[in-house]
Image (cartoon, grey):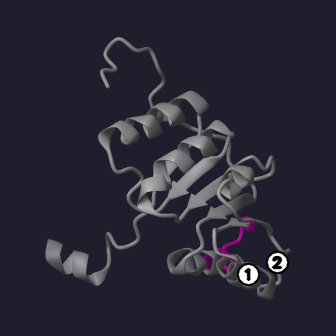
Amino acid sequence: MDKSNKTFDSAMQLRCEPIGCVKIGFVGLGVRAKRAVHRMMHIDGCKVVALCDLVDENINEAAAIVTESGHTAPATFTGKDGWKHLCELPYIDLVYICTDWASHADIAVYAMQQGKHVATEVPAATTVADCWRLVDTAEQTKRHCIMLENCCYDEFELSTIN
């Protein structure tokens, strides 16, 4: 997409007010997501407040991680449009996306349009057009969208660099 004639604020300069306690909703609760839910239980300043998956067992396992850590039971959503209902919750600050690759960009765009910040597992998008949709939506909504990657500095990567 040619942006040469478009006036916009770059997502690179996007700044938002700090959030005292980040309320997180997870969309997609496979193995990787459940591990992330578990990690969130050990981080001050965040709460997992909503969970969504197509498989009830995944929701139940992730909800148990939250409640067994002494936190309030999260809202839960399932079904084809469950993720939309989660994104529409007024009290969520961040939508954490751990679904199949093909749905990352659509969920991220919708979440930002609902006023949520987004963190998505890799890849955030599978086409250049979807990458631009993410950037354009972040700029329009003034919401952060970050692609997560947790192995940039693992032993293998660092030894490859060295």
Outermost residue, right side: 72
- In magenta, the rendered stretch is 39-50
Q: Which residue is mark 2?
A: 71
Q: Picture coordinates of residue 123 (x, y %)?
A: 38, 58
Q: Is residue 141 above or below residue 88?
A: above
Q: Considering the image in quadrants, where does the C terminus appear?
A: bottom left
Q: Which label sits on residue 60?
A: 1
Q: Is residue 58 above or below residue 85?
A: below
Within-10-Å neighbours for mark 2: few <14, some 14–19, many 20+: some
Quick check: 121 left or right of 36?
A: left
Q: Picture coordinates of residue 135 (x, y %)?
A: 44, 36
Looking at the picture, tell me which residue is in the foreground, 89 or 20: 89
Residue drawn 75% across and 59% down? Answer: 21
Residue drawn 59% across and 40% down? Answer: 143
The reply to whether residue 81 is visible in this rendering is yes
Please name the amino acid that badge 1 sits on.
Asn
